[in-house]
Image: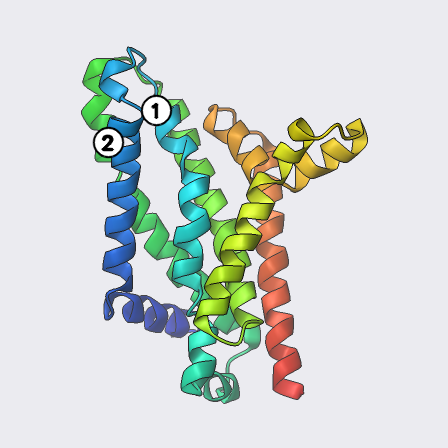
Amino acid sequence: MTPTTAVFRKELKSYFNSPIAYIATLFFLVFSSVWFFYIQHFFASNSASMRVFFSVMPTIFTVLVPALTMRSWAEEKRMGTAELLLTLPFRERDVVIGKFLATFSLLAIMLALTIPVPFSVSAFGHFDPGQIVGEYLGILLLGAAAIAIGQFISSVSSNQISAFIFGVIVLIAITMVSQAASIFNLPVWFAAVLNYLSLGYHFESLIKGVVDTRDVLYFLVAVTLFLYLNTKVLVFKKWR
């Protein structure tokens, strides 16, 4: 068993050995369903589209992902197991990737549980399967980037509460930064920079069913960057 696999199994098991996974999954499923069927009045809208269902995901993730990642390193510090974990014959990146994959797998399980939604409403209209697949891909990429950011924030936070609060603030800022371009009279070049940095801007392109390699690359770079920063934080603390 590789070090990454060992950490992955340990972390995923710890999620399901506590109420975290079940509470988070219940919140995610209930909120997204209530939003789609009741708040947005799907059956009364006379429009067979799943875009409204997927468009709320960035908002949900700004709270859900920090709740999942706040314990990644902050909890290890509180219990005094971070030092023990880093003294094992594991490379820092093995531990970081293992934790990331565990949280990402939990999020993927949550998303898999929403698959009955498009099937259940397909009888009320024609849905393009390709667009639905693109929308799910967009959610997975958005979730992966949010998890990497949340874990990095947890690695530099002193406790779970601060990790959660700062995680929410940072994700809201990175997700909504593109809207500053429409609110304020910003120069075109500056608005373009804000749009490129925004998670929400790139996600909006994907939920339209258009899988642009530039958007995919953006999310992959974001995941790689924050996992790298997380690794460097651990190296610094190990040799401090």
**Residue that carries the numbered disc 2 in the rendered image:** 117
Q: CA distance from mark 2 to mark 1?
A: 9 Å
The reply, left or right, for residue 65 in relation to residue 171 is left
**Residue that carries the numbered disc 1 in the rendered image:** 50
Q: Residue furthest top?
A: 46
The reply, left or right, for residue 212 in relation to residue 133 is right
* Circle 2 residues within 10 Å: few <14, some 14–19, many ≥20: few
Q: Is residue 145 visible in this depiction of the protein?
A: yes
Residue 181: x and y in percent read 68, 31
**Residue appearing at x 35%, y 30% in the figure:** 53
Q: How many marks?
A: 2
**Residue appearing at x 60%, y 50% in the figure:** 222
The secondary structure type at the circle numbered 2 is helix
Q: Is residue 18 above or below residue 79?
A: above
**Residue appearing at x 61%, y 41% in the figure:** 217
**Residue appearing at x 38%, y 74% in the figure:** 6
Of the 4 image quadrants, the one containing the N terminus is: bottom left
Residue 105: x and y in percent read 36, 55
Query: Do residues under tags 2 and 1 come within 8 Å of each other at their CB atoms?
Result: yes
Q: Is residue 190 above or below residue 52?
A: below
Q: Is residue 214 visible in this depiction of the protein?
A: no
Toward the viewer: 172 or 128? Answer: 172
